[in-house]
Amino acid sequence: MTLAFGAEIVTRFAPSPTGLLHLGHAHSALLGHRVAHDAGGRFLLRIEDIDRTRCKPEFETAIFDDLHWLGLDWEEPVRRQSDHFADYAAALQRLEADGLIYPCFCSRKDIAAAASAPHEGETVIYPGTCRGLDPILAAERKASAAAFALRLDVAKAARRAGPLAFLDAEPDGSNAREIRAEPERFGDVVLGRRDTPASYHLCATLDDHLQGVTLVIRGEDLRPATHLHRLLQAVLGLATPQYRHHVLLRNESGVRLSKRDGAMALRALRDRGVSANAVRKMAGFQDA
Ligand code: GLU
């Protein structure tokens, strides 16, 4: 797959500093770096740290350190999402002014879940309880509620945007195909909350635009999220990158690696004396 004639390839790796990077992250980062490098393009790093309770500065430091150790380089400055809450608040205000978001006073658990990327199997479909709240009542409750979420009215946004599609390809760029976006499958997602005008979906989509990312390369567990991101791009007037989704690395029991798999943390492998070259090979880059 090639991008539009003359377009530069700009990829990014966007980890959250909620734990140590593991072999699966190494695969994703090496792939993005390789694709950009081979095309004479640019590779960016973004720290997705809007969840101020789960993200830790020591994990951010470890991300830089482990990626350098792996042999990667990226453009400076690195975009750190927690430095840009004003950008996300402005985008939310715009959606609010367009009548596309509404306050929701339902479960706090749903609200908390909105700060992290919804890896497959973790998505909760909201039944739309607060969508039809009387606007006067909603304004009163907003003024008095300790917490509330701001949800996208997905059906309304989709009606306004009309039919949408995005280009998805294999990690090596083959089999590029146009996928019809079906954002309704997510239900009315949370885009922000009273105290934090941010969610994974809003921040990642806006940042990809602001950073000029032309090719998003990420795990296949986030493919469903792409349907929603396409809708956000349409209603916020953002550019649409192309996409490649890669398989997820699994542990010996066949379960996909997570930050809880300490043994596969890059740091743990390094401490056990495994070389960076060997780790690159374990992450699927034989000729690294
Ligand atoms: N911060 C997200 C994660 O840790 C990255 C999502 C993305 O690449 O869009 O999964």
Image (cartoon, helix red, strand yellow):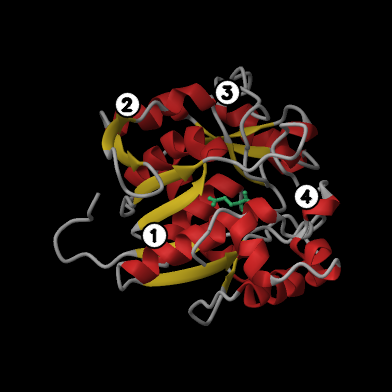
User: In x, y percent, where is residue 88?
Assistant: 54, 58
Residue at image coords 57%, 55%: 27
Choose mark 2 or mark 1, whichever is in front: 1
Q: In this view, which residue lies farthest toward the left?
A: 5
Amino acid type at circle 2 is Arg
Instruction: Quadrant for residue 222, please give it.
Output: top right
Task: Specify which label sits upstream in the sequence, 2 or 1.
Answer: 2
Task: Kindly identify which residue carries mark 2.
Answer: 159
Query: Is 201 situated left or right of 82 in this image?
Result: left
- Looking at the image, residue 38 lies above or below residue 247: below
Label 4 SS: loop
Q: Residues within 10 Å of mark 4 (few under 14, many from 20)?
A: some
User: In x, y percent, where is residue 212?
Assistant: 36, 66
Task: Specify which label sits upstream in the sequence, 1 or 3.
Answer: 3
- Camera-side residue: 229 or 127? 229
Task: Kindly identify which residue carries mark 1.
Answer: 209
Task: Kindly identify which residue carries mark 3.
Answer: 134
